[in-house]
Image (spheres, helix red, strand yellow):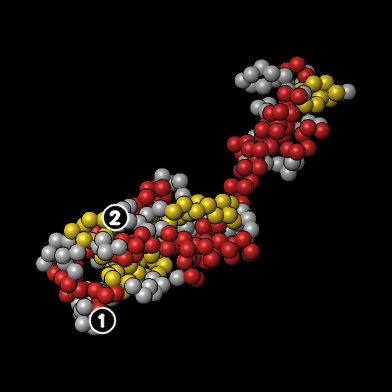
Amino acid sequence: MDNDLHGYPAPPIPLRALPHGIDARGCRCAGHHDVVGLPADRATGPDTGVRLTEPEGRGVRLAPEGRRLAGHAQGILAAVDAARLDLDAAAEPSVTLRIAGFATAIRRTLMPVIGELAEHHPGVSIEVLEHEPEEALRLLAADEVALALTYDYNLAPHAVGTAVETRPLWSTPWGLGVRSEEAKALGGKDGAADAATIFTAFGKHHWIGNSRNIADETVLRIIASIAGFEPDMRHQSDSLDLVEELILARLGVGLLPMDRPACSVITILPLHHPDLRLRAYARTRSGHSGWPALALVLERLGRKA
C-alpha cells in the first residue's frame, strides 16, 4: 500500500506519535521513504534541503524542523479524515452548513430545524444568510452556500437549470393589502370578487413592489393587465412590516400573505381567478443532496413543510 498523503487512507500509526520518535510513515509524509538506516545528514526535505532528522543512539529522531513538518501533515490528514466522515452516510454528521434564504422561510422552517439539530445532532452547525431568491441562487451556483431557500409565485414561476435540484416545501395564499376602510367600500364583496375586479377598485392607487425581487411586481403587472390598466409602481420594499407601514400611511397598496397576523386597520383581500400563491423551495446543487449533513437538514425541512 502506498502510505504517502496521496495514497490515503493512511497506515494505522497516528501522526501524533511522531514527535516522540520516528517511523517510516513520518519520513514518507516528509517526502522520504524508509529513512531509518539512512545517515541523518541525508534525511532532508525534498524541496528545501532542510534536515528533518537527527541522530539518536543507533537510530534517528525528528529534528525540530521535522516535527514542524509532521505537525502540518497531521493537520492535513485530520482534514482528510473529517472530509471522509462528512461523506460517510453511516457516520454522525459533523460539519458547518451555510444556508441562504428569504426571511419567512428562515423564521418559519429553518429556525426550528436549527433548534432540533443543536439538541440531536450537535456536530451540525448552521450559518444563516438572509437573501432574496436570485441572490441565494447566485451564492449556490458559486458553491458559497450548501442550500438555498427560495420562493416564487404560481403566476410568476421561477425556472432553474438542471444544475439545481429543487424540493417543494410549502405554499401559502397571498392577497392585496389595503386599508380596512377602503376594503369596506367594496361593499363586502371582496371575498367573492375576482382578482381583476379587486385590482380595478384600486387602479388609481400607488403600488408597492419588492426592492430585491421583481416577482412581486411581475404578479402585480399580470393581474393589472387582466384588469386593463398599468399599475403605478411607486414604492419598493423587501420588508413586509414596511409594506404595512406604507399602506397605513396611505402611500399605496401591495401584496401580503393571507396568514399575516391580523391588523385592525389593514385588510388583506383574497385574490381568486386567478389565485395567487407563494411557493417555497429548498434548492441544492445537483448531486449534493445526498451528502449526509445536507440530507439530514433537507429531511428535517421536509417535516416542517
Residue drawn where x is 62% and y is 42% of the image: 79
- For label 1, the SS is loop
Q: Amino acid at mark 1?
A: Gly
Q: Disc number at residue 191?
A: 1
Residue pointed to by mark 2: 236
Query: On the image, which quarter does residue 202 sit in?
Result: bottom left
Between 165 and 108, the one nearer to me in the picture: 108
Number of numbered discs on residues? 2
Between 165 and 40, the one nearer to me in the picture: 165
When the figure is inspected, residue 187 is found, relative to residue 176, above or below; the finding is below
Between 203 and 181, the one nearer to me in the picture: 181
When the figure is inspected, residue 4 is found, relative to residue 132, above or below; the finding is above
Image location (x, y in percent) of residue 98: 50, 51
When the figure is inspected, residue 40 is found, relative to residue 103, above or below; the finding is above
User: Is residue 218 shown to the viewer in this render?
Assistant: no
User: Is residue 280 shown to the viewer in this render?
Assistant: yes
